[in-house]
Image (spheres, rainbow, N blue to C red):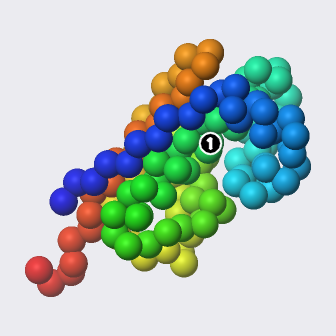
Amino acid sequence: MFLVGIDLVEIPRIKKVFSRFPSAFLDRIATEEELSYYRGKSKKRLLEGVASLFATKEAIRKLYLQKGQNPRWKEIKLLHSQAGAPLVEVSPSLKPFFEPIRVSLSHTSELVIAVAMGWERRESGH
């Protein structure tokens, strides 16, 4: 079975939270490995990146919620290939419900949308 998770984030809302609680917000949702991708970028690109990270993780969490599991933020990692394509890694503590999860992102100056696609793994022996 194929499942979809989707999330839409308002960049100004992320900017407001980020400006009030920058360390606490980032510490809650992101790993150092994820944040290293955004280091050295302009503040605008950093905010777009944080909004993308938030939307993507929320979309992936929605995949898992459909299977009755509610992952923590840091149990999901959003990394990037050398070409910049998003790559998803999930913690071994999560049940292996899905084949590798694929994501698609798009944004304007105001919004980020993330779509997570998960194909359920087939049980071995069936």
Decide if residue 98 is in sight here: no
Above or below: residue 92 compared with residue 31: below
Left or right: 106, with 43 as reference point: left
Looking at the image, which is closer to me, 19 or 39?
19
Residue at position x 57%, y 59% from top? 76
Residue at position x 85%, y 29% from top? 40
Above or below: residue 117 compared with residue 96: above
Residue 95 is situated, as x and y percent measured from the top left of the image, at 43, 76
> Residue lying farthest bottom?
125
Decide if residue 121 is in sight here: yes
Residue 20 is situated, as x and y percent measured from the top left of the image, at 87, 40
10 Å neighbourhood of mark 1: few (<14), some, or many (≥20)? many
Residue at position x 79%, y 49% from top? 26
Q: Which residue is mark 1?
A: 53
> Residue lying farthest left?
126
Residue type, numbered disc 1: Leu
Looking at the image, which is closer to me, 14 or 3?
14
